[in-house]
Image (spheres, rainbow, N blue to C red):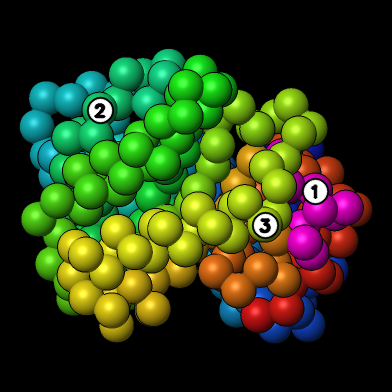
Amino acid sequence: MPNEALSLIKNIITSLENEACDIVLCVPFLYIWSFIKKTLNTNVVIGAQNCWFESEGAFTGEISAKMLSDIGINWVIIGHSERRFHFKETNEIINKKIFAAVENKINVVLCVGETLEEKDSFINFEVISIQTKLALSGIEEKYLPMISIAYEPVWAIGNKKAQDAFLVNEICFKIRLIIKKLYNENASNIIKILYGGSVNSSNSNLFLLQPQINGLLVGNASLKLSEFLKIIKNCKF
């Protein structure tokens, strides 16, 4: 609800004004404009949860990357598992969205991750590798500083069962190896890799302490003020 969302954003801004870490809140399109105005001159940045890749045309109901850029948005989540599953977004569509975002000077959080069935079939890293390679196909190296990769195992989202932090670190290292093969070693070192999937205040510090993990993509816990603030306090970067 609008009033509930507004109250949450106000409390977050007030509570985090002295925090040094990067805080990006990706909100529904409905709230973007009013939240941008609320976060001016704060350390909280508003981003979008999705975008469309065409700049203009007959795409009723879609919000293009250009539209987001025009109102000052410079962060967007692309390839979230719910977009892949519910809206049948393919790796090719995700690739087009990344092109549109970076060309409009919008930073991207690219989500990759396996389902429980893929995990149990021991093809989880093959899936992650394909998702990463196809999503970044044709993306020039100069855009990589604008792209973060969020590893979000689909089976861990919303079920209070986060992936083991040491295994996540290993997977993030393998993602860096993919970036090294696609580009070069410097690119693999500078790209930011996040973890998402039932992150909470009890386990967030375990992930943030891992050398290959640069941040977190927080889901349900971001809607609970006290929980989200505890996660922010755990940030060491």
How far apart, in angstroms, are the residues tagged by discs 3 and 1? 16 Å
Whether residue 114 is visible here, answered yes or no, is yes
Nearer to me, 161 or 150: 161
Quarter of the figure with the N terminus: top right
Lower position in the chain sequence, tag 1 or tag 2: 2
Q: Is residue 193 magenta?
A: no
| Residue 237 vertical position relative to residue 93 in the rendered view, above or below | below
Q: Residue at x 45, y 69 (%)?
A: 192
Q: Where residue 156 sits: x, y (%)?
A: 65, 32
Q: Amino acid at mark 3?
A: Phe
Residue 88 rendering spot, x and y as whole percentages = 32, 18
Q: How far across and how far down the image is residue 11, in percent?
A: 82, 58
- Residue in the image at 45% along x and 34% along y: 124
**Residue at the spot of label 1:** 200
**Three-letter code for the amino acid on which mark 2 is drawn:** Thr
- The answer for how far apart the CA atoms under marks 1 and 2 are is 29 Å
Q: Earlier in the sequence, mark 2 or mark 3?
A: 2
Q: Which residues are magenta?
A: 198-206
Query: On the image, numbered disc 2 is attached to which residue?
Result: 90
- The spot of residue 183 in percent (x, y) is 19, 70
